[in-house]
Amino acid sequence: MFKQSAQHIGTYYAATYGSIPLRPSQAGSEECQILIIGGGFSGLHTALRLALAGKQVVLLEASRLAWAASGRNGGQALPGWSCDMPPFEKALGLERARLLWDSMTWAAEEMRELPLRHGFDIDYRSGAIYTAVLPRRVRQLQESLEEAEQKYGYQQLSFIPKQDLPEWIASPRYLAALHDAGGAHLNPLKLAQGLAAAIEAAGGRIYEQSQVLGYRETGSGYVARTAHGEVRGDVLVLACNAYIDGLDRTLSKRLLPVGSYQVATAPLDPELARSLFPRGTCAIDNQFVPDYFRVTPDHRLLFGGGCTYLGGIPKDVPAATRPYLERVFPQLRGVQIDYGWGGHIDCTMHRTPDVGRQGQKYWLQGFSGHGILPTLAAARAVSDAILGDEQLLGLYQGLSNPRFPGGDLLAAPIEAVGKAWYRLRDTI
Ligand SMILES: Cc1cc2nc3c(=O)[nH]c(=O)nc-3n(C[C@H](O)[C@H](O)[C@H](O)COP(=O)(O)OP(=O)(O)OC[C@H]3O[C@@H](n4cnc5c(N)ncnc54)[C@H](O)[C@@H]3O)c2cc1C
């Protein structure tokens, strides 16, 4: 369904990175212990953990590393999953859901530490706020805080009433917010490149522009075929997310690719940029289709909002996004927008992550638009399981991720109708 281009698309991250090193394409026949398909965060984090554990790792990426969601996102590293905790509690019970939550707080801490440990920079900035537009969603913020503290022992949240909001955000749109001291924002392309360098330093092999055209199971492992060769691995890890498509039909039927898009303005006057977020946090509202935004180190506003359940991306992303941006920050009316781009998020039916194993084949997908920390938590579960500790993976395997009804042609329209109702609820 989707075609990977040979190079990154025109995101703010790719345009401002400088020269992005190109890894070789795979050719000929080779072997490894761990064969990973997909060079986004899921594949990269898994590869790094296993390479550091002494495994021979090969990672194959169809395009460039972080070409898809991992290089196009809002850079908000927020503790939690897209589905929140209720589906985990329902499937696993509170005690086991707590173990999963602990792995999330581990991921938030690890995201801060990992670049320091391996000597790379991701423009890491602490702190996130979750804002509310509707009165009933102010109550939701308060309930989330109580639940996080009482059920999960998470003490990083604090409530910000309306009168204190100007200390946090220069927007008239919100009624209240929660500050999450465990949240952060970062440059995702720098993260992906840093992870790749660390994998290579640990002996891992990475190939770009090496799409896997198919794989087969042999008696003793898996063989993945590329245009110019093949790689045999004892263990296979599928980390292809919304782009898995024909490579594995069983996994792809559990995902619906949803289009999501954002913009980066021209650099703002530094004073103006600082005034938008006096405490340097990022922000996301708690609408069903959220606006999420932050200021970059070079003083641009990065703003995402809106999505399309039929999978397409608007032709003119800046024009589609500007009304949302100006609704939040009227003082930026008419601001110059330098970059606009879109990508696909991999929604599962209940927005629960789909992480599992069958024989020596493992997969991580279904992060449903919230994946910077969840991919790291899932990569730990998968790599631990490969190394013999199945506890975390067992938790994910307790979730049920059904296939979408309606088959390939009808799944997206059916979902679009359903989601239209939830969007309507964003206004009432
Ligand atoms: C616009 C947008 C904004 C977002 N904002 C945020 C945010 O602010 N915070 C947050 O937490 N999350 C956000 N997300 C979600 C987050 O980016 C993803 O959940 C996460 O990056 C998923 O990582 P991944 O490695 O699983 O998948 P991807 O990054 O999509 O990587 C999958 C990779 O697999 C490769 N691949 C697929 N098929 C093959 C094949 N046959 N052979 C070889 N390679 C293959 C693809 O080319 C791709 O590079 C956002 C997503 C989008 C699209």
Image (tube, helix red, strand yellow):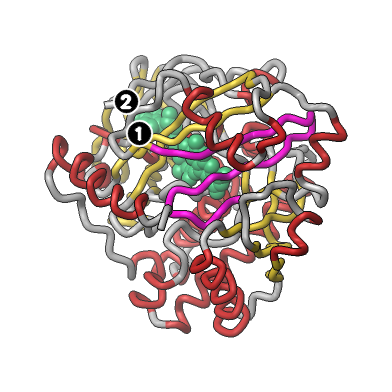
Decide: marks 2, 1 in contact (CB < 8 A)? Answer: yes
Residue 302, percent from left and from top: 64, 34
Q: Residues within 10 Å of mark 2 (few under 14, many from 20)?
A: few
Residue 330 lies within the magenta run: no
Say which amino acid is labelled 2: Phe
Q: Residue furthest right?
A: 271
For image coordinates 44% across by 68% down, the residue present is: 390
Residue 413, percent from left and from top: 20, 40
Q: Return the residue at label 2.
A: 2
The answer to whether residue 309 of the structure is visible from this angle is: yes
Residue 139 against residue 381 in the figure, above or below? below
For image coordinates 54% across by 70% down, the residue present is: 101
Q: Is mark 1 within 8 Å of ligand 1?
A: yes
Residue 402 against residue 204 in the figure, above or below? below
Q: Secondary structure at mark 1?
A: helix
Residue 231 against residue 386 in the figure, above or below? above
Residue 113, percent from left and from top: 75, 53
Q: Is residue 253 left or right of residue 303?
A: left
Disc sitting over residue 243 in the figure: 1
Q: Choose the circle earlier in sequence order: 2 or 1.
A: 2
The answer to whether residue 355 of the structure is visible from this angle is: no
Q: Residues within 10 Å of mark 1 (few under 14, many from 20)?
A: many
Q: Secondary structure at mark 2?
A: loop
Residue 231, percent from left and from top: 38, 30
Q: Which segment did they paint magenta?
A: 284-307
Residue 300 lies within the magenta run: yes
Q: Is residue 323 left or right of residue 52?
A: left
Q: Is mark 2 within 8 Å of ligand 1?
A: no
User: For this rendering, which residue is in front, 31 or 200?
Assistant: 200
User: For this rendering, which residue is in front, 57 or 364?
Assistant: 364
Q: Is residue 361 left or right of residue 11?
A: left
Say which amino acid is labelled 1: Tyr
